[in-house]
Image: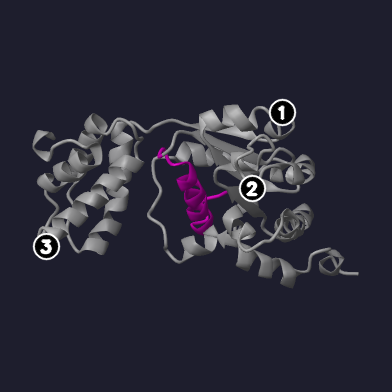
Amino acid sequence: MTKQSSFSVSAETLEDLLHRYTRDVTAEARRGKFDPISGRDKELEQMCLILLQRLRKNVLLIGGAGVGKTALFIGLSQWIVQNKVPAPLRDARLIELEMSMIGAGSQSRADLEGRLMPIIKGVAERNVLRDKPPIIFCIDEIHQLMLSFKASSYSGIADLMKPYLTAGALYLIGATTREEYDDYVATDPAIDRRFQKIGLNVPDLETTLTILLNVKEKFEKHYGIAISKDVCAHAVKLTNRYIRNRNNPDKSILALDHACARYIIGGGTDALDSASIEAAVGAEAGVNAAAVK
């Protein structure tokens, strides 16, 4: 009997389930779908270190909204595509488990589990063989899978993964905020101890500017305008000063996008100006643009 024929979930069934109910992040990275991820090399190296381990190869990214937790999913996929990961992770597939996709149209909890568990089992039994690059799962807002998160229809799903996490048969990257970690993940020690945590701080202004400079080419191509380093620096400075209830780099990237759209609507065709940045930040912060300097 071949290794392939000994699998309880056939290759055809697994690939069909992955295609229908998950998102192949590495495939999207190969197609150039994403903006370049920068400023998080240290965290990406930590992720690779954890994923290389034999047993507790599960990462939990903890940080505030907008600091770039899910951007690290993309960053890792880009490292895989660019062959920047260690040899055992080369050609790995990063698959996002989107519970809304898995649960869509299901009539009962049994239907949902009937879709999810063959995916989990099929991937786990292949990862154990180690004869092919691993399949790595990533889950945003992973706290929603905890038994204590009563507001979620996916509550308790994490318990179904527990045996595979214990055996080291899964590679799993989850993301959540500090508050939701404390309230829902840390209260389940059996799940919590199966993850190694990586805390994500809000990047400083210099790092945020570097991130903006790395993504501005995508905005220039989309809008057909030039965006200077000085304009990007102006956006970082003003969002830091006036938008206090959100985090970088997210707020600076969104402000830059907003400013480009305003510039185009106003008839601009050349290079993004500071006035458009000020108007965008004022609108985002609820402040008169004339006062934003």
Q: Which element carries disc 1, helix, strand or loop?
A: helix
Q: What residue type is labelled 1?
A: Pro
Q: Residues within 10 Å of mark 2 (few under 14, many from 20)?
A: some
Q: Residue 228 in the image: state x and y as whole percent.
A: 17, 49
**Which disc, if any, is residue 269?**
3
Query: Can you identify the residue that label 1 sits on?
Result: 189
Question: From the viewer's perspective, is the residue at label 3 or at label 1 nearer?
Answer: 1
Q: Horizontally, is 123 left or right of 282 in the view?
A: right
Question: Earlier along the polypeptide chain: callout 3 or callout 2?
Answer: 2
Circle 3 or circle 2, nearest the eye: 2
- For disc 2, the marked residue is 153
Query: Helix, strand, or loop for circle 2?
Result: loop
Residue 277 percent location from the top left of the image: 17, 45
Say above or below: 43 vs 32. above
Relative horizontal placement of residue 146, taking residue 83 as reference (left or right)? right
Which color scheme does this rendered protein use? one colour
The nearer-to-camera label among 1 and 2 is: 2
Q: Alpha-carbon distance for marks 1 and 2?
A: 21 Å
Amino acid residing under circle 3: Thr
Q: Which residue is drawn at 42% across and 63% down?
A: 32
Q: How far apart are marks 3 and 2 (CA)?
A: 48 Å
Q: What residue type is labelled 2?
A: Ser
Q: In which quarter of the image is the C terminus?
A: top left
The reply to whether the magenta stretch includes residue 77 is yes
- Residue closer to the observer: 193 or 82: 193
Tell me which segment is drawn in magenta: 66-86
Q: How far apart are marks 3 and 1 (CA)?
A: 56 Å
